[in-house]
Image (cartoon, rainbow, N blue to C red):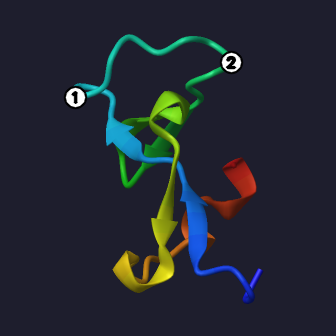
Amino acid sequence: MRQFNTRMVIPLLPLAEALKPAKTLNPLFNIEGIEHSMVTQYMAAVPVKDLKVAAWAPIRRSV
C-alpha cells in the first residue's frame, strides 16, 4: 500500500448525526459509550498527506 498516495476512508458518524442506518451497509459501533454508524456510502479515496493519526486499536476487533 505504501506505493499509493491515497487511502480508502469510510467515516464513522455519531448515530444522532447519521442518516437512518441500513442493516448491512452501515454497521454500528460503540466508541467510548457513543453509538456510531459506519457511513459506507460516503467512502472516498483521500490523499495520505491529508489524513491525521488516529487510534485504531480500541475498535479494531469489532470492524
x then y, percent, for residue 42? 45, 36
Determine whether the residue tagged by mark 2 lies in a helix, strand or loop. Answer: loop
Q: In this view, does 45 lie above or below 17?
A: below
> Along the line of sight, which residue is nearer the eye, 11 or 15?
11
Taking the image as shown, residue 39 lies to the left or right of residue 40, namely left
Closer to the camera, 50 or 24? 50
Tag 1: amino acid: Glu
Residue 37, relative to residue 31: is it above or below?
A: above
Q: Which residue matches tag 2? A: 24
Side of 4 where 8 appears, left or right: left
Residue at coordinates 52% horizontally, 42% vertically from top-left? 43
Query: 14 or 43, which lies in front?
Result: 43
Of residue 41 and residue 35, the one placed in the foreground of this image is: 41
Label 2, label 1: how far apart the Cα atoms are: 18 Å
Instruction: Determine whether, in the image, residue 63 is placed left or right of residue 11.
Output: right
Q: Is residue 45 above or below residue 16?
A: below
Where residue 47 appears, x then y in whole percent? 46, 73
Quadrant of residue 60 in the image? Answer: bottom right
